[in-house]
Amino acid sequence: MSESSNATEPDFDSGPWATIASGMKVHTKRGRLVISEGHLGLLRENGDLIDSAPVAAVQLKKGFTYSMSSIPTLVVNGNKYKVMVSYEHSLEHGLGDEQAKEIQHEDNEKLIAVIRGLGGKA
């Protein structure tokens, strides 16, 4: 099997569990944050694009800290998005609040590492 027939694994994929908001507007509660081939995409649950940019042009700020976890802000094309990954998914699968925050913290750290590794500001 040739390499060209293999699908490229994304560097980061929140799965369908990212809450994406800007200001007071929630764009989606079950969206996706995907980083693949040096490009970041914010998607609604139906796959519609909210915003995208090359990772090198993206800035991530740690944001408001609540207990052990923070809700990062991504600046994409000058637009600020609050992104919470995995928290709701963890709660819906029976984990407690502290466990859900731990998983969210780990996912945030992975996201920061990927953005830094691809030339973005974090």
Image: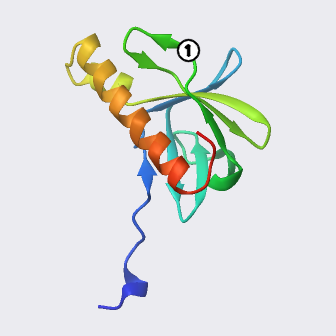
Work out whether 57 lies above or below 95: below
* Residue 14 shows up from this direction: no
Q: Outermost residue toward the bottom? A: 2
Q: Outermost residue toward the right? A: 78
Residue at 33% from the left image edge and 19% from the top image edge: 101
Residue 90 spot, x, y in % from top left? 28, 25
The crowd level at tag 1 (other Cα within 10 Å; few <14, some 14-19, many 20+) is few
Residue type at mark 1: give it: Phe
User: Which structural element holds mark 1?
Assistant: loop
Residue nearer the viewer, 42 or 56 = 56
Residue at 58% from the left image edge and 61% from the top image edge: 38
Work out whether 41 lies above or below 71: below
- 27 relative position to 6: left or right: right
- 65 relative position to 100: left or right: right
- Residue 85 is drawn in which quadrant? top left
- Residue 17 is drawn in which quadrant? top left
Residue nearer the viewer, 3 or 112 = 112
Residue 113 spot, x, y in % from top left? 45, 46
Residue at 37% from the left image edge and 78% from the top image edge: 6
* Residue 7 shows up from this direction: yes
Q: In which quarter of the image is the C terminus?
A: top right
Question: What residue is shown with label 1?
Answer: 64
Q: Quadrant of the N terminus?
A: bottom left
Work out whether 105 lies above or below 96: below
Residue 93 spot, x, y in % from top left? 22, 25
Residue 60 spot, x, y in % from top left? 61, 36
